[in-house]
Image (spheres, rainbow, N blue to C red):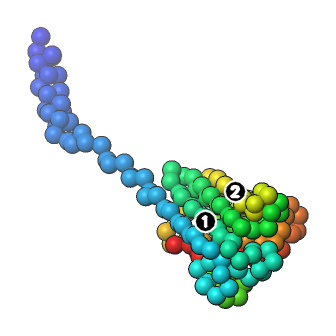
Amino acid sequence: MRRPAILLSLFVPLLAAGCTQSATPAAAPSPPAAVTLKGAGRFTDADTAAIAYDRKLAPAGSQASLTAESIGGRTTSSLVVEGLLPKRAYGAHLHTNPCGAKPDDAGPHFQHHGTSANAANEVWLDLTTDAEGTGRATARNDWTLEPGHLPRALVIHAQPTTSTGPSAGTAGPRVACLTLN
């Protein structure tokens, strides 16, 4: 009968030592905060926050509004245009720099990572306007915008985006630009 007492005397200190360690699990990392970009305005000939480069394709009074929101590993970008030419297709993309006096001031297309010109790596918002010149487009990407790497403008192009081949990502001349905040 002495054997169980000896085992018990060895087991109790081990059990007590295990009880003194913290049982609190490490805190889970908090999810990244939502990132939201917005831009809206009536296209003018001089205000680079919303500027028209081609008045034939972005007539006086035309305007646009864009919201891009990242949350939960996904980015949703929504564009609404009004006053553009009726029943016409346009390309639209997010670009790296704010709008400027020259069409090329907005820089190249914003790309999430790498240099692939495709709808999975860039934000393409092509649309066709209705009889009144109003159009809408939404793009959903399976990545989030990063605070240190954000698009700064929406550029509306003269043609829909070429989606394949060596010209993938091109959409013709820049018609108008909207700076994002």
Say which quarter of the image contains residue 53: bottom right
Q: Is residue 39 above or below residue 25?
A: below
Q: Position of residue 25 (x, y in %)?
A: 30, 43
Q: Nearer the viewer, residue 146 or 61?
A: 61
Task: Residue at 24%, 39% (x, y): give it.
Answer: 23
SS of the residue at dot 2?
A: strand
Q: Which mark is residue 127?
A: none
The picture quadrant where one finds residue 135 is: bottom right
Q: Which residue does the numbered mark 1 point to in the structure image?
A: 65
User: Is residue 133 positioned above or below 11 on the image?
Assistant: below
* Figure check: 28 above or below 9: below
Left or right of residue 12: residue 43: right
- Image-based side of 152 in relation to 130, left or right: left
Q: Position of residue 92 (x, y in %)?
A: 73, 67
3D distance between C-alphas at marks 2 and 1:
11 Å
Residue 63 shown left or right of residue 1 in the figure: right
Instruction: Identify the residue shown where x is 57% and y is 53%.
Output: 74
Q: Is residue 105 left or right of residue 163?
A: left
Q: Residue furthest top?
A: 1
Residue 166 visible from this viewpoint: yes
At 49% from the left edge and 62% from the top edge, which residue is drawn? Answer: 35
Quadrant where the N terminus is found in the figure = top left
Quarter holding residue 118:
bottom right
Residue appearing at x 67%, y 55% in the figure: 138
Closer to the eye: label 2 or 1: 1
Q: Residue furthest right?
A: 165
Instruction: Tell me the number on the disc at residue 137.
Output: 2
Pointer 2 local density, CA inside 10 Å: few below 14, some 14–19, many at least 20: some
Q: Amino acid at mark 2?
A: Ala
Name the foreground residue: 58 vs 92: 58
Q: Label 1: state its secondary structure.
A: strand
Q: Nearer the viewer, residue 114 or 170?
A: 170
